[in-house]
Image (spheres, rainbow, N blue to C red):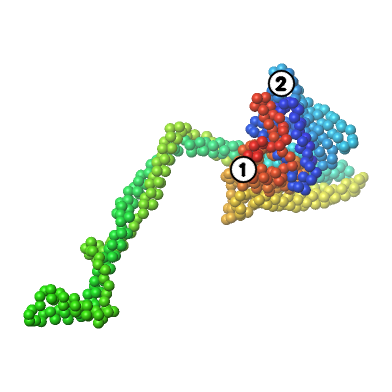
Amino acid sequence: MIFKKLILKNYKTYYGTQEIDLTLPEKSSEDKKNIILIGGLNGAGKTTFLKAILYILFGKRGITTSTDPKIINAEYEKLFSNVINNTFFDEGGHSCSVALVLETDYGAEWTLSVKWHVDINKKTGAEERELAIKETKTSPVKTVNVQNIDSYNRFIDKIIPFYAAPFFIFDGEEIRSLIEKQNTTEMKNAIQKISGISSNKELIKDLYSLKERIQKDLIKTSNSKKLDEIQAQYDVINQKLKSLIEKAEDGAKKISDLKNQQILLKQTRQDKLLNNSKSRETISIRLGQIESLLSSKQHEISTYFKNNMIQILLANKIPALKERIAKEKKYHNDLSIQSAVLQPYEEFINKLVVYDFEPPLTTDQITQLKAATEKAWFDQNPAKKPEVSYVEQLHDLNITDLNYLQNLMISTTRPLINLINDLDKLNTEYEEILLKLKNAPEASDTKEEELKIEQLTSSIGQEQLRQTSRTKTINQLTEEKRALETQLTKNKVVGGNANQLYGEMQFLDRTIKAILRYEEEYTLNKAKIIKDEFSYMLTKLFRKQDEFGDIRFDIDSYSIRLFNDKMQEISIQDRSAGEMQMISSSLIWALTRASNLKLPVVIDTPLGRLDSQHRNHLIEHYYRYLSDQVIILSTDTEITKDYIDIMNQCSAKQYLLDYDESKKYTIIRDGYFKFVKEVK
């Protein structure tokens, strides 16, 4: 089925008669343009739009998940306390209505409408519900005023079952609740129904009822005392079995309710612990940690500076000093080489100048003689003459000091700057924490929640033990029942129509056995489809590829289980809000693929908590293929350039819920947000 039109007449924020055409162009499936995009600021009427569709289809069943009449009525009063448009009411109006036009899979057009009347005090009074059906384009319209809401509900459930509603019409930001409801009776029943598994169970139940009737007829026909006794035993066991099964069902519901209470208490405890993370005690502890870190960092700075003070202070001088010392050392080495080369000459000239000359040589003559003979020496031995450049000796260093200075490391200021920066950050955080401490609340006590959680855990454990005992007894009684059934069929007495009944009994036994086998195979097949489709879509949607080592669908609990690359189970509830939305969306995908339902999908604000990459994945890989008709209600905060580009490719129609602040009502306009062109 598809939605064709929604008509709102002076309903809530919508003034006058506002119609929105939801039909898709004929080639929309070929062009993969299956999305109808409806934009609106907060308060413009997006949620009103979604809840109107839910209420038209399901009435009070669709306004809350509770089955308690008091809660349902309270929610109804809350939802419809201001059902009529204020502007229209001020003009003297006293009625409003909503209508949904849809087309079934066999081409019939249905118009479902609800009309409310209000009194002079704006209090909602009588409610009128009407159903108009046009079987074909040429056939006349048949209109029925709905008097019996239960009959109406059964009629609607034939085309869009109520149990399927959470998977087709939902608030995108609350979608994570689907995963949070795992292991609950409500969720298990919904999955069984939407996947068709519950239909098999109902069929088997009906076949067993038929078998009991045939057995009773067989007893009457046979008129056998022995069969009467066996039948009496059978009836007793069967009654015990029915009673025990009812208790087991009640026990399962009780366990589910206790677990739900436990989940709520754990959430309350978590909220308190989160609040405690901002409490005075927690902040004081953090303040002490920061003070300790400050002291440690200051000591680290002092120690580093003390150990590296010379290198830091003389960082610019040390290279020049090393260079100068190297030059002086080279000069000394060159002189030593020169001295070694001149040693033979020195020995010769020293012997020469000690001879007695007449007249004796003066000092100047000796100097001139040494210079002349030195030149003559090197002229005869030119290769031995060393080149020595004079270097003034500024340092008189022993070998220890020389080695120290030559190996002296240069310490940069970068490590010290980093340490000082760390200290500044700690000081800044210290000041911020002091401010938080001033405004911090007192810590919340979670002892009450801890005690209740402990009590619930104990109650769940006790009830599960009772369930185990019931299951064991049920299995025993079932075996006894089957044994008695065998005796009943074997001890037949020929007469009247007993032969015919006996033949029917045998045929029924074979049928039940075949259906049981079929149900087992069918359940396994559906579980595999759900698991495979869930895994496929989760991989498509998640930004982190290869995030999971394995994904399983548990047939016993009808729940999804995730494992990391080391095959350790991951807690789904611990994922981020955005990731929970991806996981829940994947579950919806899997369930729609496992069912034969082809229904339109309506989602309110599906992209609000997601980053740009997850948004793109959700639109590109999910909504384009989720259903033939996908209606997305979005806010302006979800708009990005990528979002607009993708929507231009896959949306067939776009509307804007334009709320007029001065007139206090909403007008439905063609097109999207007027500032789309400004998105860059």
Q: Residues within 10 Å of mark 1 (few under 14, many from 20)?
A: few
| Residue where numbered disc 1 is placed | 680
Three-letter residue code for mark 1:
Lys
* Residue in front for this viewpoint, 504 or 156: 156
* Residue in front for this viewpoint, 94 or 181: 94
**Residue 628 visible to an observer of this rendering:** yes
How many numbered circles does the render carry? 2
Please indicate whether residue 172 sits to the left or right of residue 114 in the image: left
Where residue 245 appears, as percent x and y from the top left, is 71, 41
Disc 2, SS: helix
| Mark 1 and mark 2: Cα distance apart in space | 43 Å
Q: Residues within 10 Å of mark 2 (few under 14, many from 20)?
A: some
| Residue where numbered disc 2 is placed | 89
Where residue 512 appears, as percent x and y from the top left, is 80, 49
Quick check: 528 above or below 55? below
The residue under the point 78% across, 51% down is 518
Residue 71 image label: none
The residue under the point 67% across, 34% down is 40
Mark 1 vs mark 2: which is more N-terminal?
2
**Residue 70 visible to an observer of this rendering:** no
